[in-house]
Image (cartoon, helix red, strand yellow):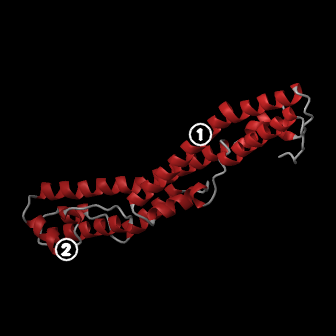
């Protein structure tokens, strides 16, 4: 089931229960006008709480009597304007988690494409899972989670660039020295394939890749001194 279908089903259920269809009921003149308006407001406020919208202000108080009093103190047009304003804010809040989930799936796809090695629930490609999680927390918590994903992707991008511009080039240069000095070192550590070095580098932490570069340096130094010892290759 898609998020859109799920939300449509929820909306139909609420409408059947009389949750949101309050406009026509209270818009007519009569003694029940303000009570109908107030109950509609409480329904909207309850949904906002369920969605963790974190709205503030007297328009979002769950006090039924407050909304009745506000209705009686205003003209009908002003009351209708406030009802529509709350509904517009709710629409924004409902859309927040849909957008959050789609953004999370796009980020997960980017992480896989870039071979960032990022895993766990944060990086699942399940849009519904992201949507349900978003619905269970505050918007600020969801925004913080989104910022973490963005940060991790930036870190991944920087690591990939380092692998391209430093590690792979350095590995190729060291492999060339191995051949030029006739050191006789073999294995993937001493490959002349830049793509091989780059692909390996992006799957490990920078500290691990740097350690590999340092190991090649030590081995070349041993070769230059005529004291070759052949440790196992990566």
Q: Is residue 4 left or right of residue 63?
A: right
Q: Is mark 2 on a helix, strand or loop?
A: helix
Against 15, residue 225 (above or below) is above
Residue depicted at x 43% and y 65%: 137
Can you see residue 66? yes
Query: Looking at the image, which is closer to me, 52 or 18?
Result: 52
Query: Looking at the image, which is closer to me, 134 or 209?
Result: 209
Where does the image place residue 24, in percent across and percent down from the top left? 24, 61
Mark toward the start of the polypeptide (2 vs 1): 2
Q: In this view, does 225 lie to the left or right of 133?
A: right
Q: Can you tell which mark lies on residue 113?
A: none
Against 12, residue 160 (above or below) is above
Against 70, residue 103 (above or below) is above
Where does the image place residue 98, in percent across and percent down from the top left? 47, 53
Query: Looking at the image, which is closer to me, 148 or 87?
Result: 148
Q: In this view, does 186 lie to the left or right of 96?
A: right
Q: Distance between the residues labelled 2 and 1?
A: 53 Å
Q: Mark 1 points at which residue?
A: 157
Against 229, residue 100 (above or below) is below
Q: Is residue 210 left or right of residue 66?
A: right
Can you see residue 205? no
Where does the image place residue 185, in percent across and percent down from the top left? 90, 37
Residue extending farthest top: 180
Residue depicted at x 73% and y 41%: 214
Quadrant (top left/top right/bottom left/bottom right) for the N terminus = bottom right
Q: Can you tell which mark lies on residue 64?
A: 2
């Amino acid at each position: 089931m898609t998020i859109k279908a799920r939300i449509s089903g929820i909306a139909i259920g609420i409408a059947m229960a009389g949750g949101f269809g309050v406009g026509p009921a209270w818009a007519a003149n009569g003694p029940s006008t303000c009570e109908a308006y107030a109950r509609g407001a409480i329904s909207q406020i309850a949904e906002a709480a369920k969605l963790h919208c974190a709205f503030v202000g007297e328009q979002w108080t769950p006090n039924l009597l407050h909304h009745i009093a506000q209705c009686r103190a205003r003209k009908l047009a002003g009351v209708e304007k406030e009802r529509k304003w709350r509904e517009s804010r709710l629409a924004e809040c409902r859309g927040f988690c849909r957008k959050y989930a789609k953004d999370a799936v796009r980020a997960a796809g980017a992480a896989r494409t870039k071979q960032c090695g990022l895993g766990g629930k944060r990086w699942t490609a399940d849009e519904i899972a992201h949507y349900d999680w978003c619905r269970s927390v505050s918007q600020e918590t969801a925004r913080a989670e989104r910022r973490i994903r963005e940060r991790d992707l930036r870190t991944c991008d920087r690591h990939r660039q380092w692998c391209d511009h430093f590690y792979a080039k350095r590995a190729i240069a060291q492999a060339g020295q191995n051949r030029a000095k006739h050191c006789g070192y073999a294995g993937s550590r001493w490959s002349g394939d830049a793509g091989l070095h780059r692909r390996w580098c992006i799957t490990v932490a920078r500290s691990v890749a740097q350690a590999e570069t340092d190991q090649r340096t030590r081995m070349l130094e041993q070769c230059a001194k005529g004291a070759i010892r052949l440790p196992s290759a990566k």
